[in-house]
Image: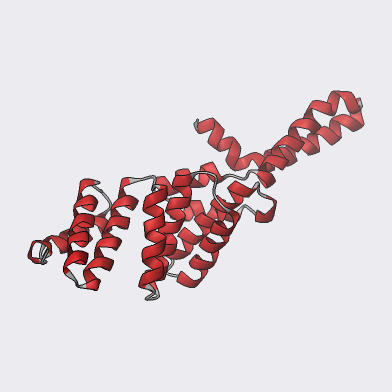
Amino acid sequence: MKYYNWLLKWRFWLGIALLVLAVVVNITSGFWPSFILYFTAVILVAGHFFIGPMRVIQEYIENGDVDGAKKILASIWFPNLLYKPIRAAYYTLKGQMAMMDQDFTTAEQHMKQSEKLGLSIPEAEGANKLQLGMLAIQRGDMKQGESYIRAAIRLGIPDKDSRAMAFLQMCSIYMQKGDIRSMRAAKDFYRKAKAEKPINSEVLSQIKQLDKYISRVPG
């Protein structure tokens, strides 16, 4: 697996090196001895432009190496050449990176671009809609935020921390509505968030803050 990720990371430059070698062999020994080198070079270079190193980027993010992920993401020079579902994932990652940098306007642009392209995996689409929902809440559009987060929960969210975050956002939205029925719904979302047993420090901090007064909430 490590070798495969290395290949994905350096695929383009390896393809260029093989292409140069193929030209040299072609000149010195003829076309047919160089054919396999040409063929392999084309496969590697085409793979870089049409598939990209998305798997490698995801691994960097999972390991918490955001700077490393940004560098690999920057190696995708022509995103419009990426296969459509991969292009959608690319814009989702760009949106996530922009959110980490607190650039919410750019993040929303990238997320909506991803949504427009569509994602073939429902969980990936769910994660994208969760991000859009949180961005809508950031700008004060609670109705749009609730709509996106409901859609995210319905589609499915791939990891427990993100699911807990979605439930906490819904809890906050319903608590702001203030009526008894909404308060009951808020408590229900709070319990669902805790049931996910998240490990993310930000999510745990939000749960801890709610712990102080959720039991005193009417309903």
Considering every residue shown, the one lying at the far front of the view is: 181
The vertical placement of 6 against 201, above or below, is above
Q: Residue 122 appears at what percent x and percent y?
A: 47, 46
Where residue 146 sits, quadrant-wise, is bottom left
At a point 21% along the width and 61% down the height, the residue shown is 186
Give me the residue at 12% from left, 60% from top: 211
Q: Is residue 100 visible?
A: no
Check the image and name the residue furthest to the bottom. Answer: 140
Q: How many callouts does the rendering have? A: 0
Q: Residue at x 38, y 48 (%)?
A: 157
Residue situated furthest left in the rendering:
216
Q: Nearer the viewer, residue 66 or 20?
A: 66
Q: Nearer the viewer, residue 192 or 7?
A: 192
Residue located at (57% from left, 61% from top): 113
Measured from the top left, where is residue 118 in percent x and y? Answer: 56, 52
Residue 149 location (% of width, % of height): 38, 59
**Rendered image coloring scheme:** secondary structure
Residue 158 appears in the picture as rendered: yes
Q: Closest to the observer: 22 or 59?
A: 59
Quick check: 35 left or right of 209? right
Q: Quadrant of residue 188?
A: bottom left
Residue furthest toward the top?
33
Q: How far across and down, in percent of the image, does residue 68 sit?
A: 49, 51
Q: Nearer the viewer, residue 170 or 2?
A: 170
Figure quadrant of the C terminus: bottom left
